C-alpha cells in the first residue's frame, strides 16, 4: 500500500490526516488515552513535549551562512508577514470579543484563531512552489521562516496588542528549545543534518495529539468560518507580501504570494497558548479547527494563484519584449546625414 503517497497528495496531509484521526479517537473513544495509559496515553495527550522536540529540531535547521540575497528575501517576507498579522490582530480585537464569537454564522471565530492563522507561513509549501516558479534564491528564502514556527510570534503579537499578557519567563520558555537547537545546528553542520531529519517525521505525531483535543462536531461547525479565514489569510497577507517582494526584495511578487499561506504547524499554537493562559482554553478547539481549515484552503489555493501570477507576469514580459523588438525593427536605419557630432 502506498499510504505515504496518498497522504502527500492531500495539501498539508502529513499534518491534517493524523489530526482528523486524532479527532475521531476523541469523538468516538474520548477515554482511550486514560484507558490504555502508558505510552499510548503519551501519544494521545503528548502535544506539548512532542512539539518541544519538533521546535528544537526546527531551530537546528536554520543556517546563518545563507547568501545575502536569500537573507534579504526571507527577511522581507518574514517581517512583512509578522507586521500584517500584528495589524490584523489589532483590528480584529476591536470587533471580536476576547472570548470569541458566540453565535451566528461565524460562531467560534476568535482573535486567537486570526492571529495564529496569519503569522506563520507554510515554509515547505513556499519552497516547493518557488522551486517550480521562482529562482534558486527565492526557493531558499524559507531559511528564516522557521523563526515563525512555534508560539513565540503569536505570543509577541497577542501581548503587544494587549489581547493577552505573558510573563517574561513564558517567553523564554517558549523560545529556549528553538534557540538551543539553532545554536547547536550552527556550531556543527552534522548536528544540523541529524536533527533536521526529525522535523518531518514528528509532524504526524503532534498532529495526532492535537486532533485528540478536538471533537468532530467542532470541525463541522468551524468549516465555513475556517474557509473564510483561509481566504482572508491569502488576501490580507498576500497583497502586502506581493508589494514587499516587488519593492523591497526585488522580486516580481510571486514569492510574496507564495508566502501567503497558513503553516501546518500553526494548528498547534492555539493549544500551546491555551496552556499558558487558562482563559483561552475554551477557545482552543474551535481555533484549532479553523486554523487547520485555513491551512488546507491556503495549501490548495496558494500554488494555483502563484502559478497564475507567474504566467501573467511572463506573458506581460514577453509582450513588452515583442513590442520593443517590433519598435526597433520599424525604426529606419541611420545614414551619415542623420549623425551630428
Image (cartoon, rainbow, N blue to C red):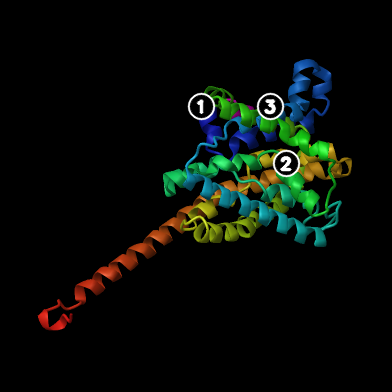
The residue drawn where x is 57% and y is 52% is 76
The residue drawn where x is 38% and y is 65% is 316
Q: Is residue 326 magenta?
A: no
- Mark 2 is surrounded, within 10 Å at the Cα level, by few (under 14), some (14 to 19) or many (20 or more) other residues, namely many
Residue 307, label in figure: none
For marks 1 and 3 on the same chain, the one whose residue lies earlier in the sequence = 1
295 horizontally vs 157: left or right: left
Q: Are marks 3 and 2 in contact (CB under 8 Å)?
A: no
Q: Nearest the camera: 94 or 212?
A: 94
Q: Nearest the camera: 211 or 184?
A: 184
Q: Residue furthest right?
A: 279
For marks 2 and 1 on the same chain, the one whose residue lies earlier in the sequence = 1
| Disc 3 to disc 2, C-alpha distance | 15 Å
Q: Quadrant of residue 62?
A: top right
Determine whether the residue tagged by mark 3 lies in a helix, strand or loop: helix
In this view, 340 is above or below 125? below
Residue 305: % across, % down: 51, 55
155 horizontally vs 281: left or right: left
What residue would you read off at disc 2? 152
What residue would you read off at disc 3? 53
| Disc 2 to disc 1, C-alpha distance | 36 Å
Determine whether the residue tagged by mark 2 lies in a helix, strand or loop: helix
What residue would you read off at disc 1? 2
Q: Residue furthest left?
A: 336
Q: Nearest the camera: 326 or 101?
A: 326
The span shown in magenta is: 198-202
Q: Main secondary structure of the magenta part?
A: helix
Amino acid at each position: 500500500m502506498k499510504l505515504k503517497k496518498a497522504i502527500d497528495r492531500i495539501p498539508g496531509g502529513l499534518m491534517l490526516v493524523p489530526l482528523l484521526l486524532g479527532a475521531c479517537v476523541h469523538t468516538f473513544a474520548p477515554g482511550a488515552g486514560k484507558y490504555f495509559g502508558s505510552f499510548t496515553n503519551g501519544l494521545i495527550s503528548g502535544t506539548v513535549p512532542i512539539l518541544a522536540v519538533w521546535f528544537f529540531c526546527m531551530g537546528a535547521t536554520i543556517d546563518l551562512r545563507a547568501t545575502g540575497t536569500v537573507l534579504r528575501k526571507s527577511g522581507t517576507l518574514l517581517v512583512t508577514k509578522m507586521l500584517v498579522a500584528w495589524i490584523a490582530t489589532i483590528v480584529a480585537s476591536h470587533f471580536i470579543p476576547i472570548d470569541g464569537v458566540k453565535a451566528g454564522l461565524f460562531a467560534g471565530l476568535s482573535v486567537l484563531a486570526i492571529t495564529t492563522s496569519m503569522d506563520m507561513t507554510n515554509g515547505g509549501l513556499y519552497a516547493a512552489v518557488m522551486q517550480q516558479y521562482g529562482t534558486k534564491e527565492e526557493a531558499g528564502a524559507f531559511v528564516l521562516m522557521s523563526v515563525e514556527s512555534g508560539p513565540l510570534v503569536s505570543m509577541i503579537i497577542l501581548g503587544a496588542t494587549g489581547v493577552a499578557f505573558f510573563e517574561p519567563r513564558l517567553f523564554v520558555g517558549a523560545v529556549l528549545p528553538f534557540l538551543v537547537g539553532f545554536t547547536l545546528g550552527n556550531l556543527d553542520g552534522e548536528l544540523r543534518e541529524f536533527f533536521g531529519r526529525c522535523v518531518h517525521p514528528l509532524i504526524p505525531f503532534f498532529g495526532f495529539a492535537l486532533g485528540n483535543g478536538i471533537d468532530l462536531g467542532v470541525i463541522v461547525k468551524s468549516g465555513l468560518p475556517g474557509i473564510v479565514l483561509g481566504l482572508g489569510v491569502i488576501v490580507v497577507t498576500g497583497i502586502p507580501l506581493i508589494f514587499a517582494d516587488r519593492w523591497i526584495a526585488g522580486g516580481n511578487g510571486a514569492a510574496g504570494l507564495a508566502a501567503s499561506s497558513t503553516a501546518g504547524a500553526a494548528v498547534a499554537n492555539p493549544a500551546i497558548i491555551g496552556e499558558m493562559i487558562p482563559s483561552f482554553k475554551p477557545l482552543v478547539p474551535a481555533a484549532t479547527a479553523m486554523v487547520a481549515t485555513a491551512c488546507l484552503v491556503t495549501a490548495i489555493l496558494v500554488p494555483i494563484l502563484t502559478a497564475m501570477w507567474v504566467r501573467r507576469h511572463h506573458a506581460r514580459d514577453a509582450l513588452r519584449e515583442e513590442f520593443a523588438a517590433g519598435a526597433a525593427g520599424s525604426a529606419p536605419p541611420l545614414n551619415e546625414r542623420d549623425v551630428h557630432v
